Image (tube, rainbow, N blue to C red):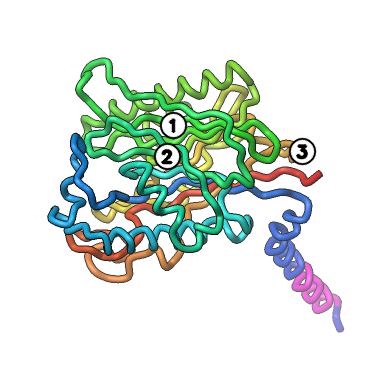
Amino acid sequence: MGLLSRNTNFMKKYLYCIGLLFITLPLFAQHKLGVYAVGFYNLENLFDTKDDEGIADEDFTPTGAYNWTPEKYRQKLAKLSLVISRLAREYCPGGPAVLGVGEVENRGVLEDLVKTGEIAKIGYEIVHYDSPDRRGIDVALLYNPKLFRLTSSRVYPYRLPTDSTFKTRDQLLVSGILAGEAFHVIVNHWPSRWGDKSSPLREYAATITRHIVDSLYRIDPNAKIVIMGDFNDDPDDKSCREVLNARKKQSQVEAGGLYNATWALWDKGIGSLCYQDQWNLFDQQILSYGLLGKDYSTLKFWKVEIFNRDFLIQKEGKYKGYPFRTFSGSTFQNGYSDHFPSLVYLVKEIQ
């Protein structure tokens, strides 16, 4: 055999081994590192079937525009439970340690959800506060008490200085212990888009989030914080890029700063929802400085993903290729949500 042939065979074997290493590295890492998933999922109008006074929920009643019957409600719960039961299982057999959720009507729908299907086995507990949103939709947090120990929670209301009548979702701060360390989650659902005039509303929401972050940093400059939610803006929009000052690259983040883990996905054309054939990445994951770096003796960021599995994608009709939603107009599709979930994975050396 000639020298060229021997070198060619060597390179083939070398490249095969390198490729095998990259495939198995995450699995190998799990023997040395504990992996913890933190996620967010906009549940797309998880309403019960009752008409509650003071809330614009009439459409989600049996006689309303969506003909929202108990059977449809049960099907919706089953669909959402299926998705949540599959989140993060590739790396975390117990699923997400904490899961922020949006577009939920009240605590009751969450109590129904955590008792449904496969996730009933997890035993998720709930952090929820009613917000003044006109539609009655709130943010909340589900957490696995085997992985996350709750220590405190509170909400920060959205009070627009220029318009005291404007009502929207509160921001939820949940603090606890994850992997033996103090850990904070801020769950958001910023004001919706309605033309060019709505961006200042989200920029004001970003000032509230930034205030929460700075308050935590004053207590602990190395605070471990994940900011998650439906921002109704993309990573490069002013609210996230300038007001929050969530940076695109880890190398750009200094003490007291923030890293937008989902920005790299956005640059690759990956979105979490689609509107008028345009993808957006509203369901973001933003991390504090304390979660960055390679010292895995303490909890650190590993990777991020948009959970856009094939079963969550509409296969036909007007919304073909979009997230498989519950309704097309007022027609029941028996889908999941018009958003994909987002996830970050954190790791820590096993002692």
Which is more foreground, mark 2 or mark 3?
A: 2
Q: Earlier in the sequence, mark 2 or mark 3?
A: 2
For the point 20% across and 22% down, the residue is 165
Give the CA distance from mark 1 to mark 3.
29 Å
Q: What is the secondary structure assignment of the residue under circle 3?
A: loop
Q: 300 or 270, which lies in front?
A: 300
Does 255 sit left or right of 236 as displayed?
A: right
- For the question of whether residue 242 can be seen, the reply is no
Give the CA distance from mark 2 to mark 1.
7 Å
Give the number of the disc on residue 257. none
Give the number of the disc on residue 140. 2
Give the number of the disc on residue 297. 3
Q: 321 or 331, which lies in front?
A: 331
Residue 39, percent across and down? 50, 46
Q: Which residues are magenta?
A: 3-14
Mark 2 in CB contact with mark 1 (< 8 angstroms): yes
Q: Earlier in the sequence, mark 2 or mark 1?
A: 2
- Residue type highlighted by circle 3: Ser
What residue sits right under mark 1 in the picture? 172
- Residue type highlighted by circle 1: Leu
